[in-house]
């Protein structure tokens, strides 16, 4: 989308004003504008003309035309949007839209045009914003001016005060021999009283309305200071928010990888997918605050001849999960014999879409069910720094966790941590202030591991720790698909299955 | 560099400034120095306007810097920004003026101004600055603006950094890094967009990095940001096709965006990303959706163009073919252009598989449109539908059977447009599809009595006369004719009516007409019909009563005897056929007698004076000759009537088909030439190409931009061989004049640049040597050349540019004025020779359809008739000569020009680069009875919308029509 120029033409074809937004020569733009009235087709129901090199989009406005010149692959929808905005701008400045009025307000119009388009791209502004932009009524400038004025007044007052003091001194020295020190004391007290009077005269002013900007200095000053505070606060928030968001996006990216890596498995026309999501919050002192596991089993049938099937499930759950089948699935058969099939065996499953057939969940505080236990020991070493020992233990040894990443927040601005001992890899992200401890795989062969580092900071700085991983080999609940059969005839059907264990949130606080 | 060639951002039309005397520089100076703020503002505006109009006010520069630059007024500040945009910042040698340093310092302060809007607009101004020396000291201030609290400042700062980096990257080498960091911390949508746009153009890697962090959230972005994301994807995939796979999902997401503009853009990009049918389908569907949903005709038309463009690719075409029925939904729009485009597209896409559906749909549309009567637009629409169905039937002969009956209904229509097309179609169909012939003829006979218009009647008569071959059909045809003519002999019948025996006549008329008329049409029921509805078919006699006549008789009574010719030919043909098919002599004789009776009765009526206009002599001749043929029954004549006519039609259809196929082949050849790669074509490796060679790989955005800005043309100009330049040099003064001048006239598209060489031939120094120019015609001097001083025997080049606004013979004239240094005399003056501007530089051959030509011919107001006065003896040669010297294009096809007939008529057409059309009709003949060496004679008529065009083209022809003797 590149807008070359915006122009206002009169009905008889004269270009009254034109503002170009890209570099083009004067002869070119004049030529283009001169060609426009001749190209323009009256009587047609559309309002654009194309030539070999450019496109004109126009709109009649009383006795005028508002014309935009764009490139030929410019986005017409966008251009029309811009055109509408332009033609609403004009009546804002011209009461009667005729040649004389446009000429009179040519500069205002050009200023307004500038606000609508930047380098050929439309800005997202509305009329009110354009008005503010062109009026240039800046609060900050008022504040600035007010501050300067008070400064000037202050300086003037000080000057007067100084002058008085000097005069006083001169007078004092004149009669110095006679009055002695007491007069001096009187003079100085007088001066201080003068100062008080001045401060009083400024102090009540904040209550006055700000209609007189030069006098509302006190209030304005305060506001300015406050806004500066707010600015800093917001800045801090932004940086923090940005931190949070970026880690969030990082995590989601990882999960995305896990999710997308799963379908890479060759899928048959019957495909079963089990997805378990973990949501764990653990205390730093070891206790599990809460662990929620939610799992779902999805079925996808691509071929309509396998519409009516039974799925045999081997449920080895010993953790006490709550199972729930889809309302249309025969629950009794599942509970009694571990077979998932529709209540009406003649009806097929929906085709070519992921159908959730079974879901189960677990909510527990039993520490032994945590797949990975993290133990973090920050020790104050007495020199303003901390020695941190952190170790993990794979509690469910049948699991194989992939891409484990333990991110530990570290204090900012104290440099990189000093790593003493380490299993796996680490990465220090100084911008996000995070130390990442990554292990490609954790399984029974390396079911424990530790890391030790020292860095300046206090023990509280190293929480909350975030953990992320995923696993595809074995499900957490140990539910397995053992076979798929046709509803009629019980002949086995070829199927594919996959299971994924994903971490939604794993936090040590 | 003249101002015409320099970059220009602002144009303001201001007659008040150009008209009044520009010598008020002193007044302006006074206003600026001493006026109040309002006077100052007005004065500054005036300065800007004058500068824009090519005045040189160098003397004001210091005044402005001194008195206006320190002003705190916002309006003055903004006006100054515009002022510095247009004010030349360099001197004649291209060096920066020293005063500009002061200006630069003022802007450094403005960049730190507490008012965010002043900061913002100053930053925007910096985007347009082209002097690195001026920008350099401002860099720290610009950088600090990136952290400003207000998004207005930030977003303009990003733009400033972007343009500075683009033009002078040494000033801010770390710009991409800076902006990237800025982007990550930014919240405001506009700032984000600008920053992202900057990254796209400056450092795609970083832009991609950023995009990948937020690729999941694109749907939640603001539409302007989404648009630039689409642009990025397009650009990245263009330079690096391997990346395509990464973005298809993202683009697909954007295809579902809530903003239509984004969807449009995304669809366009998706097509470039992937050729997979699914992708194309998604894009096409998105386009179709836009066409149907957007109410704006502009959108519909342009999106249709995109669909048409999509069709060009053979793979894409297949996908589109499946969507034909969806595309047809666009017909719901009332705009004719949209409908025409849609129908054309659908017709191109239709295949044997879905032609049935298409035809059914069209039929429905036809029925729908015939319910809405009387609108000009619906008539035209119906005509388009008929044409489309016609083409369908030609393309897929199987569909003809279903199309024919529908179309035949139109023949009875009172509107000619659609009916005429139907007729053309029927003629072709009856000739081509032997198997449908009975059906067609049957239908024709059925509708025959209801035909209302003379043209259609003529055509139908011809077809029926030509193709009714069985005895039974022939007999039926003649019966229909008799019914249509009414009671014979006609004159007596009419006289009876006219005799004024109103009641009786009416009764008789009713009796006479009833048996024939009632069966044919509803005419017998005229008692119940309102007079209004049949008004077209009836005349009022003296007593004010309406008289009903059968259709053919009515035509004759209205004096339209051209029908008599068609009727006589048709009847003769039928009679001759009847002779062949029926061996019974009695029947033969009675048939022929019947035909002759009808014809002679028509002749009689024509001469009787009863009709409004009597029959003309030509028509009498025609009918008479037919009667002769009938009475003589000569075999030669019989042959002409029965078989030669048909072979003429066959020939016509053949040549037409041949022409079409030639066109189609040419188009296909073009297409295949575009798509196919010859075995010996060089293969381009993107990595190995130099920048300049990469033209073909340049992406379309850049390409269209440079085309629009006009840089492409300039390259072409540069290639012109210098030798031809000499032809365009005009001598302006004599060799013995004190100042010799010659001009090289360089014609650009819309302007003329005069490059004048001025030579001082005296041994004095010439001061204030000024070239003063004035123009006649639709020309305008863009800027006045500045005065210069010429040393003894010195020379100089002065450039002046003139703007041309329309095609008209123009004149540039002027003089050179100078003072001789040291002499006390008045100013000296040398008058220059005129420079004629030739309009031929502005006229280009162009094409238009016959119908358009006729329409324009009727519309255009100015006609210039030029008598042919030439020494050329051959007609074709003369035409060729005219074409050569006027740049016009001959619209009459070559086949029609062939042959040696002694006369020639041709239509010519051309367009000026300003979009004006010029039409010409050439009618020349070799005068009879003169030898082959005599010149041709005749007229050329030129029509144009504007007088200038018609006149100057006429002048051009008059001047050049004589062939120069070699």
Image (cartoon, coloured by chain):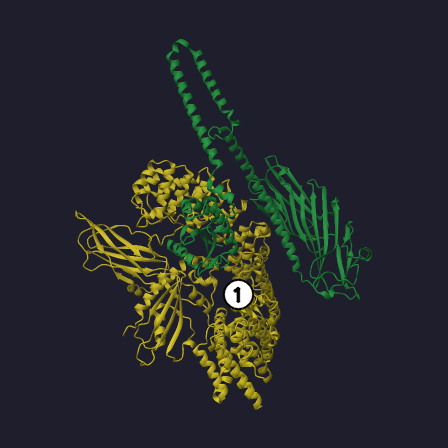
Is A373 rendered above or below residue B874? above
Q: Position of residue B36 (x, y in %)?
A: 37, 35
Q: Is residue A151 above or below residue B132?
A: above
Identify the residue shown where x is 32% and y is 45%: B97
Q: Is residue B532 left or right of residue A333?
A: left
On screen, residue A287 versus residue A185, left or right, reads right
Mark 1 burial class by Cα count in 10 Å: few <14, some 14-19, many 20+: some
**Residue drawn where x is 45% and y is 11% of the image:** A182
Residue B757, quarter of the rendered image: bottom left
Residue A206, percent from left and from top: 52, 27
Q: Nearer the viewer, residue A458 or B314?
A: B314
| The chain coloured yellow in the image | B
Q: Classify residue B446 by image quadrant.
A: bottom right
Q: Is residue A475 visible?
A: no
Q: Secondary structure at mark 1?
A: helix
**What is the display colour for chain A?**
green
The percent coordinates of residue B901 (x first, y second) are 39, 80
Q: What x and y, as percent, mark residue B222?
A: 56, 49
Q: Chain of mark 1?
A: B
Question: Label 1, on which residue?
Answer: B380
Image height check: is B287 above or below A200?
Answer: below
């Amino acid at each position: 989308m590149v807008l070359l120029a915006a122009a206002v033409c009169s009905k008889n074809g004269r270009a009254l004003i034109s503002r170009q937004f890209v570099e083009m020569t004067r002869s070119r733009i004049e030529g283009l504008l001169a060609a426009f009235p001749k190209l323009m087709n009256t009587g047609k129901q559309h309002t654009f003309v194309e030539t070999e090199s450019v496109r004109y989009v126009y709109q009649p406005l009383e006795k005028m035309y508002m014309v935009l010149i764009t490139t030929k692959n410019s986005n017409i929808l966008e251009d029309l949007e811009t055109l509408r905005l332009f033609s609403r701008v004009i009546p804002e400045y011209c009461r009667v839209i005729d040649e004389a009025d446009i000429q009179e307000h040519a500069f205002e119009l050009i200023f307004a045009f500038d606000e609508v388009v930047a380098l050929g791209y439309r800005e997202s502004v509305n009329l009110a914003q354009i008005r503010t932009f062109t009026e240039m009524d800046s609060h900050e400038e008022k504040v600035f001016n007010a501050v300067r004025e008070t400064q000037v007044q202050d300086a003037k007052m000080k000057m007067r005060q100084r002058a008085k003091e000097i005069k006083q001194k001169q007078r004092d020295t004149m009669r110095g021999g006679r009055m002695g020190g007491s007069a001096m004391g009187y003079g100085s007290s007088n001066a201080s009283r003068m100062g008080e009077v001045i401060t009083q005269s400024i102090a009540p002013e904040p209550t006055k309305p700000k209609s007189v900007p030069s006098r509302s200095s006190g209030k304005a000053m305060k506001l300015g200071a406050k806004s500066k505070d707010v600015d800093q606060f917001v800045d801090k928030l932004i940086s923090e928010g940005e931190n949070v968001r970026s880690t969030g996006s990082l995590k989601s990216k990882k999960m995305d990888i896990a999710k997308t890596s799963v379908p890479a498995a060759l899928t048959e026309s019957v495909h079963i997918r089990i997805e378990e999501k973990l949501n764990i919050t653990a205390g730093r002192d070891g206790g599990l605050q809460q662990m929620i596991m939610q799992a779902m089993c999805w079925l996808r049938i691509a071929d309509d001849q396998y519409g009516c099937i039974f799925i045999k499930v081997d449920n080895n759950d010993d953790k006490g999960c709550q199972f729930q089948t889809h309302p249309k699935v025969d629950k009794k058969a599942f509970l009694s014999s571990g077979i998932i099939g529709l209540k009406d065996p003649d009806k097929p499953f929906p085709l070519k879409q992921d159908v959730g057939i079974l879901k189960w969940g677990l909510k527990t505080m039993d520490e032994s069910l945590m797949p990975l236990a993290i133990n973090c020991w920050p020790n104050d070493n007495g020199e303003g720094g901390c020695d941190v020992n952190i170790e993990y233990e794979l509690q469910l040894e049948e699991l194989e966790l992939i891409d484990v990443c333990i991110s530990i927040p570290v204090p900012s601005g104290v440099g990189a941590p000093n790593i003493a001992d380490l299993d796996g890899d680490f990465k220090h992200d100084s911008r996000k202030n995070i130390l990442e401890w990554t292990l490609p795989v954790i399984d029974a062969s390396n079911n424990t591991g530790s890391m030790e580092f020292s860095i300046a900071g206090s023990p509280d700085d190293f929480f909350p720790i975030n953990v992320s991983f995923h696993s595809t080999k074995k499900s957490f609940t140990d539910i397995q698909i053992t076979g798929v059969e046709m509803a009629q005839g019980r002949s086995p059907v070829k199927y594919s299955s996959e299971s994924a264990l994903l971490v939604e949130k794993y936090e040590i606080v | 560099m003249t101002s015409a060639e320099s970059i220009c951002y602002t144009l303001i039309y201001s007659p008040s400034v150009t008209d009044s005397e520009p010598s008020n520089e002193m007044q302006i100076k006074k206003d600026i120095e001493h006026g109040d703020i309002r006077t100052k503002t007005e004065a500054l505006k005036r300065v800007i306007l004058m500068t824009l109009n090519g005045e040189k006010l160098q003397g004001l520069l210091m005044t402005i810097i001194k008195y206006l630059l320190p002003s705190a007024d916002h309006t003055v500040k903004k006006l100054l920004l515009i002022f510095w945009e247009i004010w030349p910042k360099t001197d004649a040698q291209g060096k920066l003026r020293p005063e500009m340093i002061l200006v630069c310092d003022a802007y450094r302060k403005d960049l730190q101004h507490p008012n965010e809007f002043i900061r913002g607009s100053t930053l925007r101004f910096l985007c347009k600055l082209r002097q690195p020396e001026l920008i350099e000291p401002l860099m720290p201030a610009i950088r600090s603006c990136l952290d400003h609290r207000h998004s207005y400042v930030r977003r303009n700062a990003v733009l400033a950094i972007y343009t500075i980096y683009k033009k002078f990257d040494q000033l801010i080498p770390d710009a991409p890094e800076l902006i990237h960091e800025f982007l990550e911390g930014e919240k405001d949508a506009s700032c984000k967009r600008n920053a992202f746009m900057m990254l796209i153009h400056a450092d795609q890697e970083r832009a991609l990095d950023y995009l990948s962090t937020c690729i999941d959230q694109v749907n939640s972005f603001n539409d302007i940001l989404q648009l630039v994301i689409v642009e990025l994807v397009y650009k990245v995939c263009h330079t690096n096709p391997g990346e395509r796979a990464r973005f298809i999902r993202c683009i697909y997401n954007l295809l579902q965006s809530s903003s239509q503009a984004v969807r449009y853009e995304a669809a366009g990009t998706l097509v470039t990303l992937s050729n997979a049918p699914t992708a194309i389908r998604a894009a096409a569907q998105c386009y179709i959706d836009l066409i149907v949903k957007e109410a704006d005709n502009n959108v519909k038309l342009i999106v249709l163009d995109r669909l048409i463009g999509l069709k060009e690719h053979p793979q894409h075409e297949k996908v589109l073919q499946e969507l034909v029925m969806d595309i047809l939904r666009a017909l719901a729009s009332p705009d004719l252009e949209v409908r025409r485009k849609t129908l054309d597209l659908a017709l191109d896409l239709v295949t044997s598989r879905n032609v049935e559906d298409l035809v059914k749909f069209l039929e429905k549309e036809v029925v729908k449109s015939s319910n809405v009567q009387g609108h000009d637009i619906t008539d035209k629409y119906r005509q388009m539908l008929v044409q489309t169905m016609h083409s369908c039937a030609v393309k897929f002969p199987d569909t003809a059977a279903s199309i024919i009956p529908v179309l035949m209904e139109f023949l009875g229509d009172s509107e000619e447009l659609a009916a005429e097309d139907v007729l053309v179609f029927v003629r072709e169909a009856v000739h081509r599809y032997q198997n449908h012939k009975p059906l067609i003829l049957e239908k024709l006979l059925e509708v025959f009595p209801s035909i209302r218009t003379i043209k259609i009647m003529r055509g139908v008569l011809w077809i029926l006369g030509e193709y009714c071959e069985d005895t039974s059909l022939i007999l039926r045809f003649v019966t229909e004719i008799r019914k249509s003519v009414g009671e014979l002999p006609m004159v007596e019948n009419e006289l009876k009516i006219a005799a004024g025996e109103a009641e009786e006549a009416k009764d008789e008329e009713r009796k006479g007409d009833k048996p024939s008329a009632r069966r044919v049409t509803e005419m017998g029921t005229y008692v119940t019909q309102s007079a209004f509805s049949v008004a077209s078919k009836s005349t009022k006699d003296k007593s004010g009563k309406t008289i009903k006549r059968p259709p053919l008789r009515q035509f004759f009574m209205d004096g339209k005897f051209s029908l008599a010719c068609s009727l006589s030919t048709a009847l003769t043909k039928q009679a001759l056929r009847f002779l062949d098919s029926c061996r019974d002599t009695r029947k033969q004789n009675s048939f022929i007698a019947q035909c002759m009776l009808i014809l002679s009765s028509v002749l009689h009526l024509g001469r009787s004076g009863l009709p409004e206009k009597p029959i003309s002599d030509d028509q009498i001749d025609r009918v008479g000759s037919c009667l002769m043929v009938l009475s003589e029954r000569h075999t030669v004549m019989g042959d002409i009537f029965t078989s030669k006519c048909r072979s003429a039609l066959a020939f016509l259809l053949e040549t037409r088909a041949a022409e079409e196929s030639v066109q189609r082949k040419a188009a296909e050849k073009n297409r295949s030439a575009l798509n196919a790669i010859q075995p010996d074509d060089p293969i381009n490796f993107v990595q190995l190409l130099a920048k300049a060679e990469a033209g073909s790989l340049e992406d379309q955005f850049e390409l269209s931009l440079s085309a629009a800005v006009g840089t492409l043309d300039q390259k072409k100009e540069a290639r012109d061989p210098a030798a031809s330049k000499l032809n365009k040099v005009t001598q302006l003064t004599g060799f013995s004049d004190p100042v010799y001048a010659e001009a090289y006239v360089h014609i650009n598209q819309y302007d003329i640049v005069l490059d004048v060489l001025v030579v001082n031939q005296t041994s004095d120094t010439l001061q204030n040597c000024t070239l003063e120019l004035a123009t006649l015609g639709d020309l305008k001097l863009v800027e006045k050349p500045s005065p210069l001083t010429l040393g003894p025997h010195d020379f100089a080049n002065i450039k002046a540019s003139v703007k041309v606004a329309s095609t008209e013979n123009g004149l540039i004239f002027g003089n050179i004025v100078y003072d001789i240094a040291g002499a006390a005399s008045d100013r000296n003056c040398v008058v220059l020779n005129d420079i004629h501007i030739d309009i031929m530089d502005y006229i280009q051959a162009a094409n238009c359809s016959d119908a358009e030509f006729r329409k324009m011919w009727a519309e255009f107001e100015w006609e210039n008739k030029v008598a042919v006065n030439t020494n050329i003896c051959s007609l074709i040669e003369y035409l060729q000569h005219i074409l050569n010297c006027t740049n016009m294009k001959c619209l009459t096809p070559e086949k029609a020009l062939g042959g040696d007939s002694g006369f020639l008529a041709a239509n010519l057409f051309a367009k000026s680069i300003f979009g004006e059309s010029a039409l010409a009709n050439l009618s020349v003949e070799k005068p009879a009875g003169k030898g082959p060496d005599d010149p041709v004679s005749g007229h050329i008529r030129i029509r144009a919308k504007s007088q200038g065009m018609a006149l100057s083209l006429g002048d051009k022809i008059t001047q050049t029509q004589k062939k120069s003797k070699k």
